[in-house]
Amino acid sequence: MPRIIVALVLCLAVAVQADFPDDPKPCKYGDTECMVKFCNKLITDKATEGDASLNLVQLDPMTVDKMVLRQGANGSPVSIDLTFTDNKLYGNKDVRFKKMRGFGKEIATKHEMVMSSKVFSLVGNYSIKGQILVLPISGSGYSNMTMIGADVKISFTGKPVERNGEIYMEASDLKYYLKPKSQHYYFSNLFNGDKTLGDTMNTFLNENGAAIFSETKETIENAFAALYEPLMTRVFSKYPYAKYFAAEEEGS
Ligand SMILES: *[C@@H]1O[C@H](CO)[C@@H](O)[C@H](O)[C@H]1NC(C)=O
Ligand SMILES: *[C@@H]1O[C@H](CO)[C@@H](O)[C@H](O)[C@H]1NC(C)=O
């Protein structure tokens, strides 16, 4: 092979390896203890800026163009049509991984990440219409929905996908579980800006935060799952699946 091509190929190989964050070293298949440490380092270092070498978007704040929480009057005391637009989600940088499962050689299996967070705040514009417990609610403006001290679990089924002869992983059937210790809601400009009604409603929402959360938990979790599934797939679309793991030792 002409020298220049050899040099180019070598150079490319080195570039690919050098791009991949190697401090701490990527882990072996299924070494979830190592992965917990790796993910914590990654999120601490990269949450606020993202990481192109891993196709990781900026996670804190994370852009949420649109999130719809809609639940009908199927017997639930909360029936709302709530749309957040141009929101930012703050708090991912303080997420800590606790435990992981899966991420072994087998792609088509369940993979799981157990985490805890300090504070999540979803902040931006909203519009709402519906009924919460016994009260009608309507308005549009600026909102801040905050969850304190949440336990979080993300699980998904890996889907092997072949591209150019290499096997990549996509995330499918992603589930997001959220269990906050407490929550705070703030909606500006409720009821066309009627201050008395708006203040009363915000107080009411916060006094009944736990009940309202448990009624809307599934809807919120589904909305978050829809947010994180493409993100997970993106992270694993950068390289063939095997490249995310340290090479197996010869003969082992
Ligand atoms: C939020 O809504 C306000 C009032 O309608 C608007 O002026 C503002 O541009 C919106 N913000 C974003 C980020 O879209
Ligand atoms: C959202 O509300 C929380 C809790 O009330 C507060 O700590 C946080 O600063 C607010 N975030 C923004 C961007 O206003």
Image: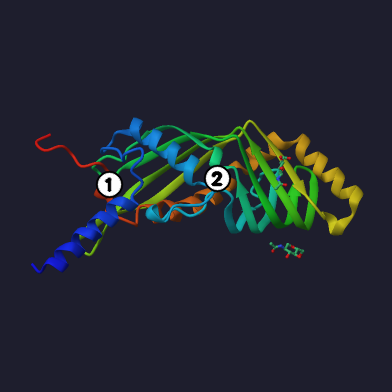
Q: Where residue 107 is drawn, which disc sits there?
A: 1
Q: Is residue 233 visible?
A: no
Q: Position of residue 97 (x, y in %)?
A: 46, 34
Asked whether 243 or 69 is in front, the reply is: 243
Classify residue 106 as left or right of residue 149: left
The label on residue 31 is none
Count neighbours of disc 2 (C-alpha within 10 A) and say few if under 14, some if 14 to 19, many if 20 or more.
some
Q: Which amino acid does label 1 sit on?
A: Ile
Quadrant containing the N terminus is bottom left
Q: Does the residue labelled 2 lie within 8 Å of ligand 2?
A: no
> Regarding ligand 1, which quadrant of the image does it lie in?
bottom right
Compare marks 1 and 2 and give the one earlier in the sequence.
Answer: 1
Q: Give coordinates of residue 113: x percent, y percent.
A: 42, 37
Could one spot residue 204 in this view of the protein?
Answer: yes
* Above or below 118: residue 92: below
Q: Is residue 163 left or right of residue 37?
A: left
**Residue 221 tag number:** 2
- Quadrant the C terminus occupies: top left
Relative to 194, is 146 above or below? above
* Residue 195 horizontal/vertical position (percent): 90, 51
Mark 1: few/some/many CA within 10 Å (<14, 14-19, 20+): many
Q: Which of 117 and 174 is in front in this view?
A: 117
| In the image: residue 18, left or right of residue 1 | right
